[in-house]
Image (tube, rainbow, N blue to C red):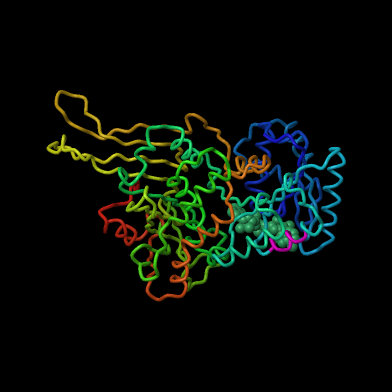
Amino acid sequence: RTTAPTSIVVFGGTGDLAKRKLFPAFFNLFIDEWMPAHFQILALGRKPYTQEKFRRYVLENLREFSRNNNYTEKQWLNFSEKIIFVNFDITDENSFRNLHDKLTAFDVTCNRRANRLFYLSVAPSFIDKVSANLKKMGLASEIEKDRIIIEKPFGYDKASAVALNKLLNENFKEEQIYRIDHYLGKETVQNILAFRFANTFFEPLWSNRHIESVQITVAEQVGVEDRGGYYDHSGALRDMIQNHLLQILCMVAMDAPVEFESSLIRDKKAEILKAVRRIKPEDINHYTVRAQYTEGVINGKPKKAYKQEPGVDPDSKTETFVAMKFYIDNPRWQGVPFYMRTGKSMVQKKSSVIVNFKEVPNKTFVNSKDKLQPNQLTINIQPEMDIRLAFMAKKPGLDMTLKPAEMVFDYFECAPDSPEAYETLLIDALDGDSTLFMRSDQVEEAWDIIATIQEEWENGTYSPIYTYSAGSWGPQAADDLLSRQGHRWLSTT
Ligand code: NAP
């Protein structure tokens, strides 16, 4: 845990992410005594707040968005003193001069050069200006002390991601850059590594010798809400598969690092992304399904079709659902299909990884009237947070009848008030631990994996856009993708 005095600078301090995630995360870290003793949060934006009005705005947001509302008035007052609203225009160099003065003044109060954490919670088009000015004014010049957090999206395709990385690398050292994917901060995602590498049970089975297939699902119940304009230029492939789902794939499929150390872990993840088989343009329809939601019912409430959402082009071809099949061409995973699906306006919110083991090879119970179900390991990421192992057991009684049983490890029971992903990631960034952040090569490889699909979906004429009713599990074509290989999506009830 870092003890160094720190200036935290939030570009976009008046924006949606800051209000819903960043301030609640900093506050919870503060009341749980994870923040350094001496810190300030400079919240930057053009909106005309006074200090008092801004602090009141933060408090209102904490009441709505913080996981913990169990704090004292004194705790809030102590925290609120650390927040300083700074009227700031990214396009105006004077704003950066003013920022320089504020940072230097804080250093004086600390009797030393404080650490600096710059959070770029602004549209990607501003990254250029912010980085260039930070460099020009020497605001992030101490490599060991100064860090820059970048929010997704990291580019729009491989070429723009390479250009973004080049731009960042011109202004900062790679070890200063923290590309955030909040999925990696989730307890249950981090626990995948603990589960795999801190136990002897599963690792010997974790390969094509014993595993039949793997399924990764990230289903959202929400539609595009008020982000239609943004989403219509993005879509599920860019917005979810390229980052969150491929990052989860890395956690599930990577080899063990020699040590739990940032660069070693990130090397192993990059190796997996390199080994993911690229899908040839002519095979895209065989490996992928894209779809858009039409009107339907979710939780008893009517939901309008994607094309009728505000900000969405009524002729939009943007996918709100993707299902696909990947192969990993390394000795461990050769021949094992990794199925992924993600969508908006689906029947329920669910993120999970399901590992399906092969059928029992011996014939001991071949004549049993009860069908043997292959073992299955489910890692529920959200909203349930648990690990479930399904296995066959003898039904209590005089005869040898079998039935499926389950062993469950429930995260909620152990830690009902576990930290939010942003808390974990922010404390790591304050500490200078980049393990859970993405390195430039990972980001570029992930774009490379989906490049042919992006190209075909944008310019080709052969990939249909299926539809699915809002409130369903997606189109029939997504089921067909698996049934061709004798598989089916699990947990779809
Ligand atoms: P937002 O609500 O639109 O906020 C944009 C912020 O940028 C505002 O604070 C705005 O402040 C500031 N801004 C715009 N022009 C500026 C200028 N010329 N000078 C100074 N500040 C300026 O966006 P957001 O949803 O918070 O998203 C921020 C970033 O996080 C984006 O890259 C987004 O892709 C990413 N992200 C957001 C979420 C989320 O849940 N919101 C999730 C994942 C990633 P003023 O209007 O006060 O100037």
Count the labels in the image: 0
The image shows residue 305 at horizontal and vertical percentages of 45, 64
The image shows residue 418 at horizontal and vertical percentages of 55, 34
Q: Is residue 229 left or right of residue 475?
A: right
Q: Is residue 331 left or right of residue 107?
A: left
Comparing 443 with 322, the one in front is 443
Locate residue 23: give its quadrant: top right
The image shows residue 206 at horizontal and vertical percentages of 37, 41
Of helix, strand and loop, which mostly describes the magenta segment? helix
At horizontal 77% and vertical 51% (from top left) the residue drawn is 141
Q: Quadrant of ligand 1?
A: bottom right
Comparing 318 with 430, the one in front is 430
Depicted 402 relative to depicted 475: above or below: above
At horizontal 61% and vertical 52% (from top left) the residue drawn is 179
Query: Is residue 367 magenta-colored?
Result: no
The answer to whether one can see residue 239 in this image is yes
The stretch of residues the image draws in magenta is: 126-133
Q: Is residue 459 left or right of residue 261?
A: left
As drawn, the residue found furthest toward the left would be 367
The answer to whether one can see residue 221 in this image is no
Comparing 431 with 98, the one in front is 431
Image quarter of the N terminus: top right
Locate residue 327: give its quadrant: bottom left
At horizontal 60% and vertical 40% (from top left) the residue drawn is 424
Q: Is residue 81 left or right of residue 421?
A: right
As drawn, the residue found furthest toward the top would be 398
Depicted 360 relative to depicted 50: above or below: above
Locate residue 480: give its quadrant: bottom left
The image shows residue 220 at horizontal and vertical percentages of 46, 52
Depicted 359 relative to depicted 122: above or below: above
